[in-house]
Image: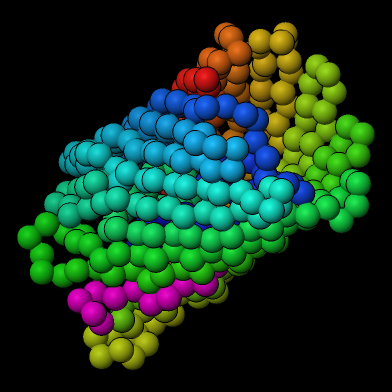
Amino acid sequence: MRKTFATFVIICGLTLLGIPVHAQPKFQYPVAKGSFGPRFYVQNWRLNSSAGNATIRAFFTPLFVAIHLSPKFDLSFSGAAAASSLKNGASQTLQGLTDTKIRGIMKFNDYHWLLHIGLNLPTGKNALEAQEVKVNNVLAETVLGFPLKRYGRGLEVDWGAAYAFAVSENLKAGLGAGILLKGEHAFLQNSPFRFNPGNEVSVTGGIDFKKNNLATHWNLLAKIFQKDQINGQAAFKEGTQIEAEGMMTFSQKKFAVVLALRDVIKADNVTYASGGEILSTVRDNFSGNIFWSTGQVTYNVSERLALTTSLGLNIFGKSEAQLGEAQLFNLGGGLQFKSSEHLMLNTAFSFSTGEAKDVQRRTWDLRGFLLTGGLSLRY
């Protein structure tokens, strides 16, 4: 069973939740009544091997709306429309809406505590046709790094808490925990099978150190997964996952240099037979066994315009179910333009090249690009 479902948990410093706290001593934000952010993503990969060639392309337009209801409570909404295509001799397509996400964040105790609750509403496409499953399976390849791997899931609830405090004048720390309760949903059209993914529990801890022009951030995250079920029978269990990440930033008036590292270590996944006995243990890259490293330089041309360039290396471990043993080099650039106090435009482009091995041990040459852009309107 492929694991293609995104996780939304309360984590100090995880940008996935849009909480730029990074384990700060207090969860404080710039005062604003609300923000509005339409964006677009275009990603394309070409895969070549002795077995043939394939091209996978994805386009989606996420929309994010945040409302500052009070100094201690924020509410946000997000959703997207998406379209993907796969060409490997024949052409297959997948298009539709994604799920709608609602998030509420509450800060209290002089902003040292943060509580979070979220809903995933099943407005996205989840019951797929046979050709759409082929596209979805390629989107789920971890090596390719598509930001949207599956359009729709079931009704989900995630909630959690985090606490931030100061150890010293320069050293800050934070702790957090959360749980994601997943809902049952269909996976294939005209099929009696219902998929019930296992719930997830996450715990995290992080520290920040800042002195003069140097700032560092370190975070450790653990994820524990329950069994997935099909029609009430255990089918799959994802292995426990440990993620360690660090970031160092050196900044001056005109430029900033950032070095980011992330390593994911994962226990083997388990597949179950219909009677509940273990059928196999499979090491894969659905979520883990990956090392990322990125260096980025930002140059502030003026108060309104900033340019960036980046270089990265991604290393993926061996997989028995997906592309693995991969090495990818990334080169990118972008710009950010602030037209006014309330409106900002940003765009970025990256090119990736490398190779990976499939489950038949064939080598695939990979070439891809990612183009992103969007507006951020605050009032």
Left or right: where 27 falls relative to 44: right
88 or 261: nearer the viewer: 261
Residue 213 in percent (x, y) is at: 88, 32
**On screen, 253 above or below 318?**
above
**On screen, 113 above or below 260?**
below
Left or right: where 96 falls relative to 252: left
Residue 337 in percent (x, y) is at: 59, 13
- Is residue 340 within the magenta segment? no
359 or 215: nearer the viewer: 215
Residue 52 in percent (x, y) is at: 31, 45
The count of marks equals 0
Q: How is the image coloured?
A: rainbow
Left or right: where 39 falls relative to 204: left
> Is residue 266 among what the camera can see?
yes
Q: Residue at x 83, y 18 (%)?
A: 253
> Is residue 87 among what the camera can see?
no
Q: Residue at x 51, y 34 (%)?
A: 68
Magenta-tinted stretch: 223-233
Q: Quadrant of residue 207?
A: bottom right
**On screen, 316 above or below 184?**
above
Q: Residue at x 17, y 54 (%)?
A: 127
Q: Residue at x 78, y 30 (%)?
A: 257
